[in-house]
Amino acid sequence: MRILAIETSCDETAIAIVEAAGDERAAQFTVLGNALLSQIDVHREYGGVFPALAKREHAKNLVPILEAALEEAELLHEDTQALPEAMHEKISEILAREPGLAEAFFEFVSECEPAPIDAIAVTAGPGLEPALWVGINFAKALALLWEKPIVAVNHMEGHIFAALAKEVSYDTANTPLIPTRFNLVIEDVEMPVLALLISGGHTELVVIKKWLEYELLGQTRDDAVGEAFDKVARMLSLPYPGGPEISRLAESLRFSLGGETAKYSLPRPMSGDATCDFSFAGLKTAALYLLKNNPEMSETEKKHVALEFENAVADVLSKKTARALEKTRAKTLALGGGVSANKHIRRTFTEKIKNEHLDVTLRIPSAALTTDNAVMIALAGFYRALRGDFSEPDALAANGNRTLAP
Ligand code: KG4
Ligand code: ZN
């Protein structure tokens, strides 16, 4: 099954074309095309993602990104297509609220053959609603024109599948994988799976006992981890997105300090309580006061703040996850979401699982699939398509607060 996946929930416009085979127990994927345009430079001057701007950028970028993905997949074939008047009208209606998108769409589709794909997967939420709508309406227009079914995917579900997928660089015997392409497999996943999802908008622990069934075990009561990283970075006058910036400062100091600890100490909110919930607002505020009380901090002292902040986050995340592992007796721990790109967090979990949870397998997304992308939407979309879980286009709507658990 060949899936075209669209992701526009935040500040990345992404389209992937993935060839998928197998079943829930063992699935193989070849990424034929993977085009992504980050809007970070556009949002940086606002210090964060500005929804109206994100929507405008997605509308501007979707057609070029589709073209790039199809081209990379070698599925772009020029042809002249005359669109029946009724079809033109319907698509104009679907794209009426996305400035400039209809014009670019018609120009593109009138010059190429319908893409040889089997289904369109699209992120339906959670995320920024105006941004999600652009992707959804684009998916609806393509689905109508090419007569393909639509699969609605939860963005966080995408992050879980990205974590479960393993990159394979060799041509496995008896699989349809293509050796020269980016290949992934999802196999030998032992249930229950505990997923720790850490991103710009979410921090949650989710249990999966059966494929596509999610149970929320705990979540943040205030800020998401990524949000805390971004806010503390701003306090340190670092550019958006702050996660990688803090990580860079912390790593450089950690390396030069050897085993020594940071100069300051910050709290580990809720790390000792019995729930699987998180709180990061207090940690963020403590960092704010630390900086306010020391206005003349040197660059090295600021690195100490970054280091201690990162240590505090990794501590809280690993303690809470250890508790959740005990509670659920999970066999697999999946770490997903943009913050799982953090080197220190990856290291902390790798060590912890190796030393303290011998019966648990840790799954972390490969670097290319850690932050937002469309490949992860294709992976989750395949599992949904296998069950025939397609959406009625008229009923498909963006939901900024879409949850995993029913
Ligand atoms: O999953 P993602 O790409 O988008 C959302 O779904 O939110 O996550 C973005 C978040 C941002 O807050 C960003 O600062 C954070 O992930 N992030 C990191 C790192 N790379 C990205 N946080 C800490 N360390 C990193 N290396
Ligand atoms: Zn994300």
Image (cartoon, rainbow, N blue to C red):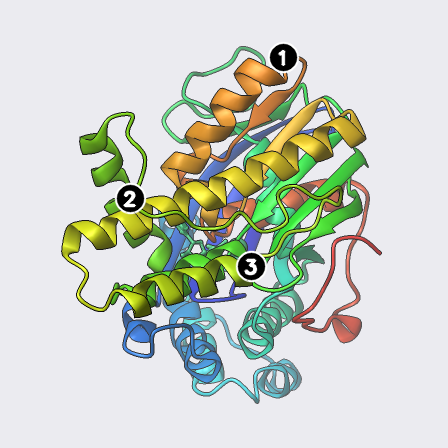
Q: Which residue is mark 3?
A: 224
| Type of amino acid at the residue the image marks with label 2 | Lys
Kindly identify the residue that appears in the image at 79 percent across and 31 percent down: 327
Vertical side of 276 occupied by 68: above or below: below
Q: Nearer the viewer, mark 2 or mark 1?
A: 2
The C terminus, quarter of image: bottom right
Query: Is residue 154 among the parts visible in the rendering?
Result: yes
Q: Which residue is mark 1?
A: 358
Q: Nearer the N terminus, badge 1 or badge 3?
A: 3
Of residue 4 and residue 152, the one placed in the foreground of this image is 152
Q: Position of residue 262 (x, y in %)?
A: 31, 40
**SS of the residue at dot 3?**
loop
Q: Nearer the N terminus, badge 2 or badge 1?
A: 2
Quote the CA–CA distance across marks 2 and 1.
Answer: 34 Å
Kindly identify the residue that appears in the image at 46 percent across and 65 percent down: 285
Q: Position of residue 394 (x, y in %)?
A: 77, 75
Quote the CA–CA distance across marks 3 and 2.
Answer: 25 Å
Q: What is the number of callouts on the image?
A: 3
Q: Nearer the N terminus, badge 3 or badge 2?
A: 3
Which label belongs to residue 273?
Answer: none
Of residue 277 and residue 107, the one placed in the foreground of this image is 277
Vertical side of 299 occupied by 342: above or below: above
Q: Is mark 3 within 8 Å of ligand 1?
A: yes
Quote the CA–CA distance across marks 1 and 3.
Answer: 29 Å
Kindly identify the residue that appears in the image at 61 percent across and 56 percent down: 279
